[in-house]
């Protein structure tokens, strides 16, 4: 066990060194422009392709002797780092062990979110895309617990409560995720944060790809409670005539 911990710690340190070597000046590519006003977040400006290459190399070097618990420990060492790319490498490596995900990972993800280790929209959505979503696909019995996340005091937990449902929806093999999107959307409509409004609109739009009639019916029935940003995101995939018709009921 001690040897495994040293291997994980060494891999975490190696990934940080690799990202520092790949760092570019902000004039070449300035990732911070997508996070205006957030002075706590750091950037190596590596770009997504280079970041994922680091994650791939780490995974290739350790996949034969790591278990999913080692990948979780690796991510746990990188998530508190202030740099966006470092957090992403931790999540990307963990995501490559998705076939071994167990339900215990659900609580771990909530703790990372609640401790503000992913205190930005990009890291939160990355976690949803490569960890939380695949976890829900593998263990759909966990999905109802996302309603508790929607009531959480931390806004990143609340955002993840609905963004985490997107991978199951895109699988197209379950209606439970779609039903849950509409339930959680109603819980989140009163939320004051614009990043929550955008996330809800995004999820409703994805649900609408499966059943556009249901989405239109939902928007009409709940127009008074749906924030403007959510509404506009949700109707983006409708044809121009339907969008105009739906926008007219908000006036």
Image (cartoon, rainbow, N blue to C red):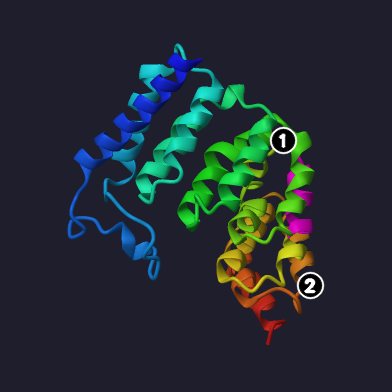
Residue 57 within the magenta-colored segment of the rendering: no
Between residue 163 and residue 205, name the one nearer to us.
163
- Identify residue for label 2: 222
What residue is shown at x 22% (from left), y 46% (from top)? 23
- Identify residue for label 1: 173
Q: Tell which residue pokes out farthest to the top in this image.
A: 64
Q: Is residue 214 left or right of residue 4?
A: right
Number of marks: 2
What residue is shown at x 61% (from left), y 35% (from top)? 134
Q: Would residue 96 be visible to someone looking at this image?
A: no
Q: Secondary structure at mark 1?
A: loop
Above/below status of 39 relative to 25: below
The residue range painted magenta reads 173-184
Residue 6 x, y percent position in the rendering = 40, 21
| Quadrant where the C terminus is found in the figure | bottom right
Residue 135 x, y percent position in the rendering = 64, 34
Between the residue at mark 1 and the residue at mark 2, the CA separation in whole angstroms equals: 27 Å
Residue 148 x, y percent position in the rendering = 76, 52
Q: Secondary structure at mark 2?
A: loop
What residue is shown at x 77% (from left), y 72% (from top)? 220
Q: Quadrant of residue 103?
A: top right
Above/below status of 87 relative to 60: below
Q: Is residue 27 left or right of residue 188?
A: left
Q: Tell which residue pokes out farthest to the bottom in this image.
A: 251
Above/below status of 106 relative to 230: above
Q: Is residue 244 left or right of residue 2?
A: right
Q: Are marks 1 and 2 in contact (CB under 8 Å)?
A: no
Residue 177 within the magenta-colored segment of the rendering: yes
Residue 155 x, y percent position in the rendering = 61, 61
């Amino acid at each position: 066990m001690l040897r495994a911990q040293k291997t994980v710690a060494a891999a975490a340190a190696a990934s940080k060194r690799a990202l520092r070597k790949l760092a570019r000046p902000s004039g070449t590519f300035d990732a911070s422009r997508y996070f205006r006003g957030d002075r706590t977040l750091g950037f190596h400006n590596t770009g997504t392709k280079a970041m994922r290459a680091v994650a791939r190399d780490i995974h290739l070097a350790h996949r034969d002797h790591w278990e999913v618990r080692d990948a979780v420990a690796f991510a746990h060492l990188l998530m508190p780092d202030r740099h966006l790319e470092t957090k992403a490498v931790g999540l990307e490596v963990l995501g490559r062990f998705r076939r071994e995900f167990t339900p215990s990972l659900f609580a771990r993800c909530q703790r990372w979110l609640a401790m503000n280790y992913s205190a930005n929209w990009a890291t939160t959505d990355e976690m949803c895309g490569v960890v939380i979503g695949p976890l829900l696909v593998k263990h759909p019995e966990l999905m109802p617990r996302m309603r508790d996340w929607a009531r959480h005091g931390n806004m990143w937990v609340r955002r993840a409560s609905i963004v985490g449902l997107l991978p199951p929806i895109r699988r197209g093999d379950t209606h439970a995720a779609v039903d849950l999107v509409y339930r959680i959307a109603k819980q989140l409509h009163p939320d004051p944060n614009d990043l929550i409004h955008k996330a809800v609109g995004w999820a409703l739009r994805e649900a609408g790809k499966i059943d556009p009639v249901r989405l239109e019916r939902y928007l009409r029935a709940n127009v008074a409670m749906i924030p403007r940003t959510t509404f506009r995101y949700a109707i983006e995939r409708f044809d121009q005539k339907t969008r105009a018709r739906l926008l007219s009921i908000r006036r």
